Every structure is written in C-alpha cells, then in structure tokens.
Image: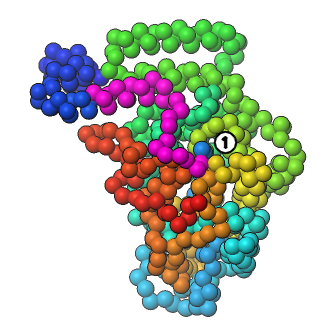
Amino acid sequence: MDLQHLNPHFGSPFSSRRDFLKHAGAGFGMLGLAGLLSQEGALAEIYADPLAVRSPHFKPKAKSVISLFMYGGPSGFDLFDPKPELQKNDGKTYEADFDVFFGNPGPLMKSPYEFKQYGQSGQWVSEVYPALAKCVDEMSFIKSVHCGSNNHAPALFHLNTGMPRVGFPSVGSWVTYGLGSENRNLPGYVVMYDPRGGPIGGPQNWGAGFLPSSYQATPFRPTGSPILNLDRPEGMNREHQRNQLDLIGQLNREHLEQHPAEPDLLARIESYELAYRMQMEAPEVTALDEESEETKRLYGMDKEISKYFGTQLLMARRMVERGVRFIQVYSGGGHQQDSWDAHFGLKENHDLHCAETDVPMAGLITDLKQRGLLDETLIVWGGEFGRMPVSQGSIGRDHNPHGFLMWMAGGGIQGGTSYGETDELGYNIVSGGVHIHDLHATLLHCLGLDHERLTYFHNGREYRLTDVAGKVIEPILV
C-alpha cells in the first residue's frame, strides 16, 4: 500500500511500503528488514493464489472437517452424560452461587430422559438419540469443555474464532489459510445455516477477520441456486461471460502493475475467477437426484422433520468427496425454541431438535464410513455452551459455560472414548478441563497443522487461532 495514500501528511518520497522498507534498513536492522520483506513476499504469494494446496506441518489424519454447530447450547447431561445425583435430588434447592445468564436459579431439575449404554465402548446416550447411539464406537465425548462467557454472542465468537469478540478469523478460515483447497472450482470453506435464521453475529462467525477475504466461508443453500447471485445474467452465454471476465482481469492486472503493494487486487481477480468456475461445479453438489433412495433415507430425507438437516449433511458429504476443506452446518436459528436455547422448556426444545438431527448425523457417520471417508474426515459436534442443572421457569435450563460436552469423530479420533468430567450435578469441571483453545489445537493437529506455527502477521504481531494458549487433547487421538 502506498504510504502517502495511507497518510496524506506523511510527506515521504517513497512510492510504496516495499520501497520505504528498503531505504529504512539501517533503522530497522538488516535482520528485521529481511523478515519484513519475507513476510511481504509470502503475503503476495497467498493473495495471488489463496486456495492453492499447501503442505501441512506433519502427516495429517484428516483432510476435511465437518462442523455440526448446535446453536443455542445443547444440554450434555440430558443427551450423553447422565447425572444420577441430579435425578436423586430433583426439586431440591441447591445452595451454590450459580452463574446464571438472567433471572434467579430454581431448584435442581432432573433429566426428563432415560439413558442406555451402547456399543462395545458402553457409552451412555439419551433416548432422544436412538440412531446416533449406534455410532458411539466412532465418537469421542469431551465432557469438560469450558469457555469464558455465558452470553451467546461472545461464546459463539469464542468457539468459532478463538476470541470472544468480533474481527478475528474463524476456524475454517485458519484451516483454508493453512492448507488451501483440493478443488479449485468450489470454495475451500462452506457454511450452511438453519432456515429459521442464522446465529447471533451472522457472518462474523464464519468471516476471515484480518486474513485475506478469500478465506471467509461461502454460504450454500440446499434448494434452488446453491449460492446467491452466482447464476449468469439472463441473455449472457458462457463465452460472453468469459470475455467479460478476461477484460476485467486485464484491467485489474494493469492496475496492480501500477500499485504493486495492494495485494487485495490479486484476491479480487481470484474471486472473479472462482465465481466463474463455481457456476459449473456448485450446482452438482446439490444435484441430489444422483443419490439413491436408500442413501436419502439413511440421512432422514424421507421424514419431514429431518429432511432439511439431512439434505445439508448429504451435501456436506458430497463436498468432502469433491475436496472442500471445511464445512460448517448449523442446527437451530433465531431465538428460544427455534434454537437449542432451552430457557422455557427443555424437553419440548430438545425433543424437536434431536428429532431433526438424530438420523441425519447417524447417516453421515455411517455413509462416510461405508465410503472409506470417515478416517480422513473430522466431525465436530457441539454448541457455544451447555445448560445448568437447576431449572429456569420451572421446565427450562439456563446457559452453562463452566463445563459442557462436545464430541468428535472420524479422522484422527479414537472412537468409543470419553475425556474429562464435570461434578455430580454437571455444573463445574472436576477433571480434564478442555478450553476452547485446546479444542482448536486438537482440530488443527488432526489436519497436520501445529497450532503454534500456524500464524499470521497483523498489526505488528503474529496472531494464531489459539492466541497464546492451547494444548492438544492427546488421550482422544488415535
């Protein structure tokens, strides 16, 4: 970027940042100067071809990630982690200082669901997940996750970006920045959200932050045109569009030659080209008529309640087959009962959302395994926090960020395992605490990325997804 454009009062004779740095060697020290110029060269390479395949730091177990985000905060001890003491003490007042989101905590409230043990591993699963229960030997349950906020927005940002505030790159952005994409005709990072609405913060949850914009997610829809505004204008054929893009690209490149320190131009050129290529391949992802009726039933597409989420997960599998690096799918949108945010009726809420997601998630795991893709696809399930063991409004539960449950399956994960533990009521962690940074470090590790080495220079310092913390959860790995 031209420094005089940045500050009209700068008064510098240098025409670009690179020119300025070259002439400032004595002031910076030649070693520091070399580092700065090296960073600038690396950035130019990234902007020129942002989705080019890049080598991982070490041999990966997984090639792709499917993030299943249960927006609103599901209750782990009502789904996968039964608490007998909570059942025994139902209705009793518990003398503790609960960190509630709003209102006053009510008495202890037992789970409305029955539990059974499943699989060779004997993992506990609630009656509302009968199909998913058959997959427990592929899953690792992390029962001791914690984050720093009981408010949706910062908790969402924390889980999605590693930071509890806006402006930072999302997990999928870091992954595609680190590895690129194996398919040049599709986005490296895709998001599919609930038809009832997106999460609080919207695109901030899947944005690129200070990374190049090429690394932000592209929203996909399971019906109609998969990507908004992707279709060619009426009356324009592919040849005319190609000629138009060539002209625009030529003008952009000429502008880039005059302003070589503006790498955003490279990203702009690439974005036009990617959109052109996607017009051919993106519709194929949603061409589910190619799938058998048996496969559609496997994903719950024959039932109205699970059809939408099942369609999204079948699309996710098709994206994995085509080399898309990171796919995030949301269950729950809008507020209260439209999401997993069960303040005013836990059973009604979780009955609905479990029925929507049970068969599709079991189908995804089963289908990936049958196709030999599960070992190279990492699945991550969870929400921004869990729920309280005490009641709210007599039949609901408030937010609990102090100890909640997530699970992983697939590439790099030792199935049929559990890690960490909360207390006998499910409120606080008593062993094996897992911070969001640890979760992210583990996800990157499965992809062959060292979370301490995956960095980006911004505002005078190196940033990373895990900030200055994070450790890999070794016991759950293969």
Q: Is residue 273 left or right of residue 280?
A: left
In front of the other: 23 or 263: 23
Name the outermost residue toward the front.
59
Residue drawn at the location 48% of the way across and 9% of the way down: 250
Q: Position of residue 436 (x, y in %)?
A: 45, 60
In front of the other: 183 or 96: 183
Residue 226's place in the image compared with 383, above or below, is above
Residue drawn at the location 63% of the way across and 12% of the way down: 241
Q: Position of residue 145 (x, y in %)?
A: 49, 67
Q: Position of residue 264 (x, y in %)?
A: 40, 25
Q: Is residue 223 visible?
A: yes
For the N terminus, the image quarter is: top left
Q: Position of residue 100 (x, y in %)?
A: 45, 74
Residue 199's place in the image compared with 382, above or below, is above
User: Badge 1 is on which residue?
Assistant: 320
The question of residue 56 being in magenta is answered with yes
For the C terminus, the image quarter is: bottom right
Residue 153's place in the image compared with 231, above or below, is below
Residue drawn at the location 37% of the way across and 43% of the way down: 455
Which stretch did the figure color magenta? 37-62
Q: Is residue 122 left or right of residue 342?
A: right
